Amino acid sequence: MEAFGADGYGLARELLQRGVGAIYVLAFVAVVHQWRPLLGERGLTPVPALLERVPFRARPSLFHWHYSDRFAVALGWVGIVLALAVVAGLPQRLGTAATVAVLGLVWLLYLSYVNVGQIWYGFGWESILLEAGFLVMLLGGRDAAVPWPTLLLLRWLLFRIEFGAGLIKLRGDRCWRDLTCLDHHHETQPLPGPLSARFHHLPAPLHRVEVAANHVTQLGLPVLLFLPQPVAGVAATIIVVTQAWLVLSGNFAWLNVVTIVLATSALPDAWFGRAADLVGSTPAATETAAWFVLVVGVVFVAQLIMSWLPVRNMLSRQQRMNASFNPFHLVGTYGAFGSVTRRRFELVIEGTRDPDPRPDGEWSEYDFPAKPGDPTRRPPLIAPYHLRLDWLLWFAAMSAAPTREHPWFSSLLRRLLDGDPLIRRLVRHDPFDGAPPTAVRVRRYRYRLQRSADRRATGRWWSRELVGDATGIVPR
């Protein structure tokens, strides 16, 4: 039992559980706001159609038992309430049994959405949140010692996130090897933020330093997480700093924030001074319930066995960037931006109310919350919230024929033609105030971030040039 408890990591447990709880809150808020227009019965990719053809064993979800839009949104609200309780520390104070029950239910609820969320929930950070949520459940409540095995599994997750991302870059785009990727990435990333223009226009030598530092952080520091203190803590602190740098440079949903939270698994209480006294002393390992010790031990051994697949993936020349090897999204493999686009294209959707739509007629643009559209609008700060449609529109802009290659995009155009009020939730500016247009069309533009002097002179954050039409005129 003495090897079970990690003395001096009480604050780390609080930060891990409450931090993951806060991310869960954002994830469930996105469910409440975005689920119906994207995945509801009249959504762009309806869940009921998926449930008819996919068995429970392939994608475990509560929605196999029952699905309706009201039920899906109601469970989202349940998730918000339970996650807020975790942020407030309520189940943790009640004890280990309550902590496991509440966090286990939150994990099950979110798993139910991810497993039927299709392309909208196909991002690596969905699986990271599920894996982190499952592990912080096994940190127990304040009546239990902080388990060393769980802390090690959390560091192992952090290792896979960072090391996998480093490997995929070295094996992927050549620009990561010649240190030039950041000449383009800040401008061409999915959803630039308020400071992205400043990052993009940094001197080229500084971009080289950034890329080199990224390689050191992702390929070197993760190994140090498993060494004794203070080495592990120093490595975790540097990871936190580099992830905060990424938070400033763009909008990557909760990927960077959850990585920061996971890094606290390597930060001992002594490093926080008096702040650690707020959580008080943790119980000795001998006082921890036997059933909890058994559960943690079984999960630890099981995850070690399951780790063979992500390790094999990382060692493979055909490394997959983000993949889960089981329907519970546990012990997956992760990575990001193995390739970097050199030019930024955007699809601009326009509509008209002209009874006889003509190419040279009067057309008005739809604007979305975060993706570049109006050149005079400053790129917003969205992260750690996740705008799923805006992200998918970035992928669609890379397609030569978006309506053919992305069926959901055709559905989006049809919903706009119908004046669908659900879709209006996902649109920042509807030029027709909900009235259906007579036709829509999609035009492709090349976008470039302006320098500060040009921005002050023109009032534009972006310059753009028309490349051509991505679709013809689509009538109602």
Image (cartoon, rainbow, N blue to C red):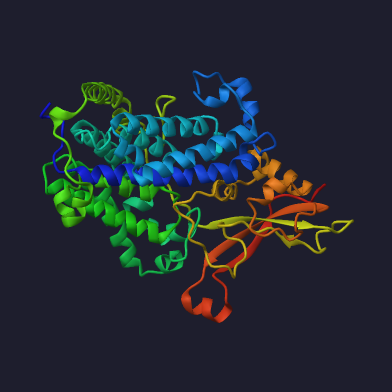
Can you name the residue that lies furthest to the right here?
A: 355
Among the 4 quarters of the image, the one containing residue 183: bottom left
Please, is residue 6 above or below residue 177 in the view? above
Query: Could you tell whether 450 is left or right of 286 in the image?
Result: right
Please, which residue is most extreme toward the bottom here? 457
Viewer-closest of 317 and 63: 63
Query: Is residue 457 among what the camera can see?
Result: yes
Circle count: 0
13 and 252: which is toward the camera: 13
**Where residue 349 sits in the image (x, y, percent)?**
69, 55
Q: Position of residue 448 (x, y in %)?
A: 53, 65
- Residue at image x 42%, y 65%? 200
Q: Looking at the image, which residue is at 26% across and 36% down?
A: 156
Residue 179, visible in the rendered structure: no
Q: Is residue 25 above or below residue 301?
A: below
In the rendered view of the protein, which quadrant contains the N terminus? top left
Residue 93 drawn at (x, y percent) = 30, 39
Looking at the image, residue 196 lies above or below residue 89: below
In-front residue for pair 238/16: 16
Residue at 14 percent across and 51 percent down: it is 270
Q: Position of residue 18 (x, y in %)?
A: 34, 45
Taking 286 as reference, is 305 left or right? right
Q: Residue at x 53, y 25 (%)?
A: 62
Residue 347 in the figure: left or right of residue 395: right
- The part of the image, by quadrant, that contains residue 311 is top left
